[in-house]
Amino acid sequence: LGLYACACRFEDVTAEGFSYSFKKTCEFISSSRPTARDLFYACERMIAACGRGSTLKKKLAELRKEAFDIEKENIAVCHSIGSFGEQLLSDGCTVITHCNAGSLCAVEYGTALAPIYEAVARGKNVRVYADETRPLLQGARLTCFELCSAGIDTTLICDNMAAGLMAAGKIDIAIVGCDRVAANGDFANKTGTLSLAVNCAHFGVPFYVAAPSSTVDKNIPDGSAIVIEHRKPEEVTEYFYKERMSPEGVKVYNPAFDVTPASLVTGYITEKGVFDNKQISEFI
């Protein structure tokens, strides 16, 4: 819908010029998040829709239709992920999640939070531990906000507290989102996801990934080929602090994402069902 709104602002262009400008806009937006496959997926669909119109008016009409079609499809996908994932959550269970993959990230229920919303809607008592998700605190600022707004029992933790909770037997299941899934099931998600997966494997906690088909990149054989976005050091050293918290001149490593191997994944919650890592070819 954002791309359609942007296209509506193009002025004094021919149909050919419109297509060129729209493609360049899509390329610019795609460059903002090189790791996220679903962004490329939406842009590719919108570029194709633009090409179906022979006149400026028809191009805009095609773009509007495609934008709302994508929205409707995404709503259906999120609800399906919620319905399938809800079956993994028993009454009284405790879920841990990382970053934000809910209504503030996608549409309706979102992806990783969809099973939680669906379980609660069906009368189940579900508790959630939300990793704060350093350094930009998407878990603290977004996930906690929306879950608490929905009246769901939510506890905020620092990222490095997850292992201690698991050791104490306080976590039943982990559900995270994903930004890109390789052909072998390796996936990229917000940095810190890999640590959570390793902890889950060590303590025997089931680790699930909410993975809509739009995040799958069949052209990438495994996680080593996923491009990882790196962000500015100030996010680690200065954001959310009144004063700088580290010395001037220190080097900062700040990847926005990390890659979790398929071997650490218990299952992928998709709009087609739940698949374990041995069934990955059926999902992909």
Image (cartoon, helix red, strand yellow):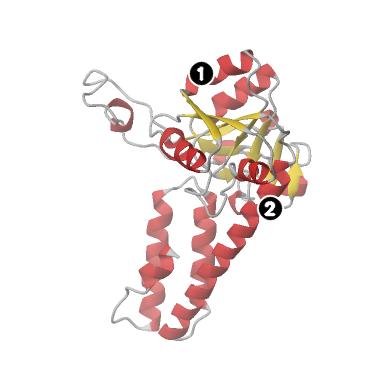
* Residue closer to the observer: 43 or 266: 266
Disc 1 + disc 2, Cβ < 8 Å:
no
User: Element under label 2?
Assistant: helix
Q: Which residue is mark 2?
A: 80
* Residue closer to the observer: 237 or 30: 237
Coordinates of residue 16 in the picture (x, y in percent)? 39, 80
Coordinates of residue 136 in the picture (x, y in percent)? 38, 34
* Residue closer to the observer: 86 or 228: 86
Name the residue located 56 percent from the left edge and 45 percent from the top edge. Answer: 180
Amino acid type at image mark 1: Met
Name the residue located 56 percent from the left edge and 14 percent from the top edge. Answer: 164
108 up-or-down from 71: above or below:
above
Coordinates of residue 274 in the picture (x, y in percent)? 74, 43
Tell me: 7 left or right of 191.
left
User: Element under label 1?
Assistant: helix
259 up-or-down from 74: above or below:
above
Label 2: how many residues lie within 10 Å, few (<14), some (14-19) or many (20+)?
Answer: many
Name the residue located 53 percent from the left edge and 33 percent from the top edge. Answer: 98
Label 1: how many residues lie within 10 Å, few (<14), some (14-19) or many (20+)?
Answer: few
Q: Which residue is mark 1?
A: 161
Tell me: 198 left or right of 266.
left
Q: Quadrant of residue 122?
A: top right
Name the residue located 75 percent from the left edge and 42 percent from the top edge. Answer: 275
